Amino acid sequence: MQNNTKTPARVYVAIFSMALMTFLGILNETSMNVTYPILSREFNISLDVTQWITAGYLLTVTIVMGTTAYLLRQFSARRIQMACVAIFIIGDVMCALAPNFGTLLGGRLIQAVATGLSTPTMFFLIINLIPRNRLATMTGLGGMVISFAPALGPTYGGAIVGSWSWRMIFWLLLPFAIISLIAGQLTIRNEPVGNDKAFSWGSLLTLAISLFAIIDAVSTVGSKGVTMAFWLMIAVAIIFFAIFMYLNQHGQSQLFDTSVFKLPTIRLASISYFALQFINIGISLVIPVYSQYTLHASSFVAGIILLPGSILGAFMSPLAGRLADRHGFALPVILGSCLLVIGASCFAFWQNHLTPWKMMWFFMIERIGFNSAFANTLSNSTTLVEEHQAADINSIFNMTQQFAGSLGVGLLTALMAVFQNRGTGTMAARTFQGGQLDFWLLYGLAVLTLILFIANYTIQRIDNMRKG
C-alpha cells in the first residue's frame, strides 16, 4: 500500500476484530496467574504443576504460530479468523466447566491454538494493509494489545476471583468473542497467494518436540531439582532442534525462512525481543504469586498491582510508535530499555522493602519501558528485510515472544518452587528467597537487553552511513 493511499474504515474494523480476538486470547494467558494458590488447593496439586496452565498455553501458542507464515499464504485471513473464534469458544467452555485439572489444562491448550492463529493474523493485516508512513504507529497499537493484555490478565482474574469463582473468568469472555467473529466476517477481505509446496509437518513436529522438551525440563526443577532427567530432556531438545533446522533448510518446504537470521541486526533484534517478553510475562507472574505468598495480599490486590502500569504501558505503545515514525526506532527503543533496567533494578535492590504500593510503582516504570521498545522492535525488523520476508519475520518474532513467555513462566515458577518445596521457614520466607532469585534474573536480563539494543542500532547506523 502506498503512503498516500487513504485507508478505508473497513480495514480498521478488520484489524480491530483480530485485535479483540488477540486481546481475549492473551488476557486469558495470565488471568489465571492469581488463581495458582486456589487451584493448587482445589485440585490438590503443587505450584510447579499448576504453572502448566500458563506455560502449556504459551508453548502451544508458540507451536501454532510456526504454521501461520504458511497458513496466511494458503488461506484467507477471514477463514482463519472464523477458525480462531470457533476454537476459542470450544476451549473456553471446557475450562469453565472443567471438573478436574486435566480438563482445565486441555481447554487451555485448545484456546491457545486460537491465540496462536490470531496474533500473527492481526500483524499480517497491519503490515499488508497499512501504509508504511503509519506502520510503526499501527504496529504500536498492535503491540499495545499484546503487552497490555498479559499484564491486565491478573487484575481481571483477581477481580473475578474476589467476587465470584475462577470459572467466571472464562464465561465473561464469550460475548466478546462473538463480537470479534461478527466484525471480522463482515470486514476482512484478502486473497491468499497460495503456496508452491506442501506444508512441512516434519519441521513443525520436530520444533514442537524441541520446545516442549525445554519447558518440561525447566518445569521439573521446582520439584526434583537438576537431575539426570533434566539433562536428558535438554539433550532431546538440542537434537530435535538440529533435526528441525535440517528439515527446514533441506525439506520440500520451509516452516519459515530462517535465512533472515543472516542479518546480524535480525539476530540481535530476535534475542532482544525474546528477552523483552520473558521479562514482561515473567514479572506479570512473579508479582501476583509473590504478593500473595510473601506479602499476604488478597488475589484482588495481587492483580490490581499491575493495573496502573498496564494502562500506562498501553498508552505508551502507540506513542512510542509515533515517535519512531518521526525520529527513527533507536530513540524510543533504547530509552525504553533504560527504563526497563531501572524498573527491574528496583525489584532486585529493594526487595526487603517491597510493599504492594511500591511494587505497583516499580511495575509502572517497567511497563513504560517495555512498551516503548517491544512493538518498535518488530516494526524495525520488518523494514530490514525484503518485502516478501515480512510474513516470516512476523511468524518468527511472534513465536519467539510466546516461547519467551512460556520459558519465563516455567523457569521463574520453578525457581520459586525450589524454595517452596525444599526451603526452610514459613511459606512466606521460602517464597521470599525464590522471589529474590527471580528478581535478580530479570534485572540481569534487562541489562543484557539494553546492551543488545545499543549494539543493534549502532550496526544499523553504520550500515545507513555506508549506503548514504
Image (cartoon, rainbow, N blue to C red):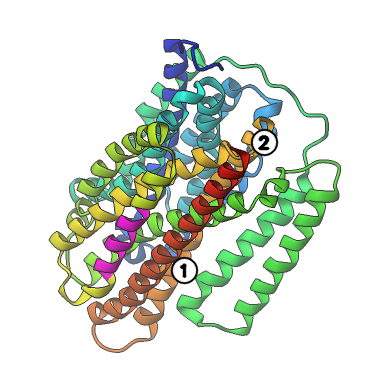
Whether residue 174 is situated above or below residue 100 in the rendered picture: above
406 left or right of 293 in image: right
The residue sitting at 60% across, 40% down in the picture is 384
Q: Position of residue 158 (x, y in %)?
A: 24, 51
Which residue position is annotated with label 1? Answer: 411
Q: Secondary structure at mark 1?
A: helix
Which span is picked out in magenta? 336-347
Q: Quadrant of residue 341?
A: bottom left
Q: Nearer the viewer, residue 431 or 128?
A: 128
Q: Is residue 56 visible?
A: no
Residue plotted at (36% across, 81% down): 419
Mark 2 crowdedness (10 Å alpha carbons): few <14, some 14-19, many ≥20: some
Residue at the image position 50 percent from the left and 27 percent from the top: 126
Tag 2: amino acid: Gln
Q: Tell me the kind of residue under disc 1.
A: Leu
In this view of the protein, which residue sits in the foreground, 42 or 257?
257
Q: Secondary structure at mark 2?
A: helix
Q: Determine whether, in the image, residue 225 is placed left or right of residue 234.
A: left
The image shows residue 278, relative to residue 170, as above or below, that is: below
Identify the residue shown where x is 19% and y is 53%.
300
Residue 111 image position (x, y, % from top left): 49, 42
- In the image, 246: left or right of 34? right
The image position of residue 53, as x and y in percent, is 45, 56
Check disc 2 and report the residue beneath it: 389
Earlier sequence position, callout 2 versus callout 1 = 2
Q: Is residue 152 magenta?
A: no
